[in-house]
Image: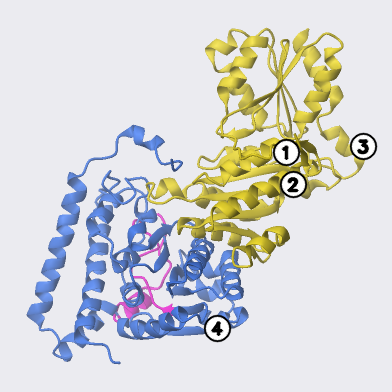
Chain colours: A yellow, B blue
Amino acid sequence: MREITYMQASTEALQEEFRRNDKLIHLAADVAFELRQEFGEARVRQTPVSESAFVGAAIGLAGSGFRTVADIRMATFGFVAFDQFVNQAAKITYMFGGQARFPILYRMRNGLGVSAAAQHSVNPYSMYMNVAGLKIILPSTPYDVKGLLKTALRDDNPVISFEHMALGGVKGEVPEEEYTIPFGQADIKREGTDVTVVALSKMVYLALEVAEEMEKQGVSLEVVDPRTLVPMDKDTIRNSVAKTGRLVVVDEASQTCGAAAEILSIVVEDDKTFSRLKAPTKRVCGLDVPVPFSQPLERYVIPDREKIIAAVNQVMS
Amino acid sequence: MAIGNKELIKLYRTMLTIRRFEERVSREFLQGNILGYVHSYIGEEAIATGVCSNLRLDDRIISYHRGHGHCIAKGADIKRMMAEIYGKKTGYCKGKGGSMHIADFSIGMLGANGIVGSGLPIATGAALAAQLEGKDRVAVVFFGDGACQEGEFHESLSLASIWKLPLIFVCENNLYAATTPARYAIPIEDIYKKADSYAMPGTVVDGNDVVAVYEVVKELVARTRAGGGPVLLECKTYRWHGHFEGTYLPDVRPAEEIEAWKKKCPVARMERRLLEAGILTRQEIEAMDKQILAQIEDAIKYALESPLPDPEEALEDVFSV
């Protein structure tokens, strides 16, 4: 099978869906050139540096019959438009009693580890998870990003796609044939028997490296990638933990009230799964500090190989 | 072309419907029969009426918390509005929105927004849709002097301008945003003058003169339909009641000011005009009033007799299927 980058896979997803649907519009502060070349200025538009305006415009456009992609670029710029996300996009279907559909894809680049400092190093997905009405996807591989973006572009609801900044150049197998990945379907990236490691976004790669390493020491890790946070595939996660009896969640985002906390909760609150636990559940998350610039400081904040190994050893002991 | 008698009567009827609707809703709220927040449109009827009378069914409007007037003027069913205000299953939003979030997408009423300023960006999207559809539709967004203080006002006018959107910005300047006077919070007195900063025409009109509003909007709509781009219209007006019904927020406005504006009642003004021109007799006006009051009574009855939603319905409509 051919190998393409995460970036190429996401571009393909958009190109294919733009060809499929001529009422699909793209909004972004920097023009998506390839897309504009093929589909023209009317459909691929450059927005001014006004996030509230174009995040909101996407809502009005979608509610008036045009599917819309609004690319916020860095996730941190989304905060400026937070009201449009949480009071408008999230609630508009519901508070109007389902009178209209709002097919919107919001794309954001999240993540740490690139020396971008506090304001440009964010993983805000759990903030949006706490507001009902937004679907949230977190694709980690080229295969996943293409399949999930295509599904997002056929979903009649506001979807936020968090795509880690450092994954653009990562290569992976992506079929030429048409495929989509449904929301609410986790992917077991590596099967194992001793510990379930649920990993989010870029942490999937770290978890897989640790799994490879620890295999040699006779510890078998099962790496589960939820792929979508809303809706979340609770069954796959619970079944995996019921099988292994041990859970470590790895999330680059800050620990307090993060997505990892939600994942731990859905496991321990389920009677069946809880009864199979052999050890308390653990999470390895970003530290609760604004992300610092200097490399040794930033590295200290981010989950790394040592921290994951330590957590696995803890649940194994 | 001068406005015909039939149209004048229609304008009056719409204003009187809004007035009687709002009076009744206010009464019911104060008696404890309506919950939450009600923001009365009394005093501003000429604006919703004068603007919406120029619109087609396929034109889109977006409103804000003081939105009952715009719904009625755009052609909403007052029974379903009342049911929604009463939180009933038969309401426009199945009881999920209430007074602040009435919408009727089938008539191009894309909803009342509860966050000051937040409807403006959404309206730019609705206007972009109109532009892309190529059927000379327009979009209208209603907002107050409060919204002009929000960043989204600036962003939306700017975006509408650079994309030449068919969007009519209608500012209902009633001089107060809750308890914040416009003369304090806004550096210039005339909001329409801000239009210059966005390279669009700015117009001002007496918001209590429905014929004046109608006539100026007629021109603006024609211009916008023809591809002239967005415009800002400031309607000078005043609300009779406080920011919302009830006594939680003190009404900081001087009593003399309120009384002076009540003398400029847009409904009474139009009534005088119709009588003086011999277009309607006093008996005809009273008959119309009686008819409207009966319709509102029916709407109340409909609301009272409609069932509340089943509790489990709270879980529906989070997402479209």
In the image, is A60 to the left or to the right of A303? left
Badge 4 is on which residue? B193
The circle drawn on residue A8 is 2
Q: Are marks 1 and 2 in contact (CB under 8 Å)?
A: yes
**Which mark lies nearer to you, 3 or 1?**
1
Q: Earlier in the sequence, mark 1 or mark 2?
A: 2
Query: Is circle 4 on the same chain as circle 2?
Result: no
**Chain part drawn in magenta:** B235-264
Few, some or many residues within 10 Å of mark 1 (<14, 14–19, 20+)? many
Chain name for mark 1: A
Circles 1 and 4: CB atoms closer than 8 Å:
no
Q: Say if A257 sits above or below B47 in the image.
A: above
Towards the viewer: A198 or B281: A198
Q: Is residue B59 left or right of residue B177?
A: left
Q: Residue B261, can we see it?
A: yes
Q: Chain of mark 2?
A: A
The residues tagged by marks 1 and 2 sit, at their Cα atoms, a distance apart of 8 Å
